[in-house]
Image (tube, rainbow, N blue to C red):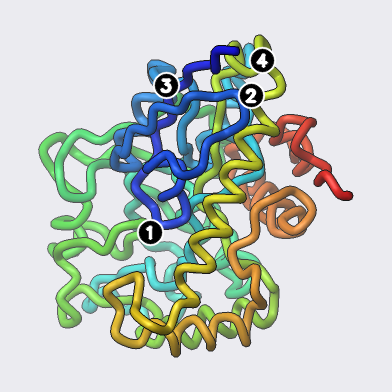
């Protein structure tokens, strides 16, 4: 029986290595894995639906659900997760010493709909008293001019967002003091520790305290299937989910090896042991049930940012076939 040929665009993560090299094969699917940078994958999938399956910004995917008709359906797999306290940068001359100093300031962000800034805005509002609408947002390219939102946005009037001037970059504007702070996923090239610094210099301790308090390890990306592909073959949602879980399981095992390190980190064993002590063996969980609480928080932040027209429930994000785990 011939297999269904599908193309997946996803970065070359260790947790998807098995899918990329073919050692993990989704049931009934012949997978063509394209290892592409995340920004390229997101842009090409959202704008042109170029792939059958793709890694996608969780926020952009959520925005897409309000487009008519919904173009994608996701499975509860999160190839990228990241604590984002480290990703708030400030101009050292802006007078910003603590989070509340951000109120009334000019904040750069590559795209307002980016997942990382959704988490940052939500965390600042909920845990530090910085309301989403207490600043102005300025969007554009971080290191190259001309970046625009992948999807059109219809934001409430109290949330003020404008594009930066043509030819400018947010990284340089932060250094020059044209913006006061920057919420981003990538460390800006102008962050030199003198003129541009992190809001939280000891971010690891801050992020660990945040996890201990909330038990949330923020998910950044999910896996989205073009809706037409899914509707024609609904079985692929569960098949893909199982395969991603198996590839991740193998990655967990590789990282536990002590005869030799699988990654170029000299203190990998110590990091792994500390991570497991703090977060448990399955510290990067896939699946709906283990992530429902964190997803509820994300969707609340998304709605508070004006990106969701209504507050969604986590189950509305995913193919129904993937909401319950098969158990023997």
Residue 51's disc is 3
Distance between the alpha carbons at the discs numbered 2 and 4: 23 Å
Distance between the alpha carbons at the discs numbered 3 and 2: 20 Å
- Name the front one of labels 4 and 1: 4
**Residue underneath mark 2:** 66
Q: Earlier in the sequence, mark 2 or mark 4?
A: 2
Residue 306's disc is none
Q: Secondary structure at mark 4?
A: loop
The residue lying toward the viewer, choosing from 227 and 47, is 227
Residue extending furthest toward the front: 1
**Residue underneath mark 4:** 233
**Residue underneath mark 1:** 183
Residue at x 17% of width, y 47% of height: 169
- Verify CB contact (< 8 Å) between mark 3 and mark 2: no
> Eyeballing the image, is 24 above or below 126?
above
> Eyeballing the image, is 249 above or below 155?
below
Q: Secondary structure at mark 3?
A: loop
Residue at x 69% of width, y 80% of height: 213
Distance between the alpha carbons at the discs numbered 4 and 1: 39 Å
């Amino acid at each position: 029986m011939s297999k269904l040929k599908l193309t997946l665009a996803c970065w070359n993560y260790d947790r998807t290595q098995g899918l990329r090299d073919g050692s993990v094969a989704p049931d009934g699917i012949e997978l063509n894995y394209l290892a592409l940078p995340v920004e390229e994958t997101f842009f090409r999938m959202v704008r042109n639906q170029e792939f059958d399956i793709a890694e996608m910004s969780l926020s952009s995917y959520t925005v897409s659900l309000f487009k008519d008709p919904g173009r994608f359906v996701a499975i509860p797999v999160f190839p990228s997760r990241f604590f984002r306290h480290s990703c708030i940068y400030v101009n050292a001359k802006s007078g910003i010493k603590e989070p509340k100093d951000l109120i009334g300031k000019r904040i750069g962000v590559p795209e307002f709909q980016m997942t990382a800034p959704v988490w940052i805005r939500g965390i600042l509002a909920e845990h530090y008293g910085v309301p989403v609408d207490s600043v102005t947002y300025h969007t554009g390219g971080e290191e190259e001019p001309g970046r625009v939102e992948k999807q059109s946005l219809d934001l409430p009037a109290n949330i003020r967002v404008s594009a930066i001037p043509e030819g400018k970059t947010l990284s340089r504007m932060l250094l020059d003091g044209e913006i006061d702070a920057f919420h981003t996923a990538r460390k800006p090239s102008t962050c030199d520790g003198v003129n541009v610094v992190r809001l939280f210099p000891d971010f690891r301790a801050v992020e660990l305290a945040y996890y201990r308090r909330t038990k949330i390890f923020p998910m950044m990306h999910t896996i989205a299937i073009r809706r037409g592909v899914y509707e024609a073959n609904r079985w692929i949602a569960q098949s893909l989910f199982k395969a991603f879980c198996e590839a991740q399981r193998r990655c967990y095992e590789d990282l536990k090896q002590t005869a030799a390190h699988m990654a170029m980190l000299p203190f990998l064993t110590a990091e792994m042991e500390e991570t497991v002590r703090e977060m448990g063996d399955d510290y990067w969980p896939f699946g709906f049930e283990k992530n429902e609480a964190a997803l509820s928080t994300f969707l609340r932040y998304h709605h508070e940012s004006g990106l969701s027209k209504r507050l969604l429930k986590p189950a509305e994000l995913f193919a129904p076939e993937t909401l319950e785990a098969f158990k023997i």
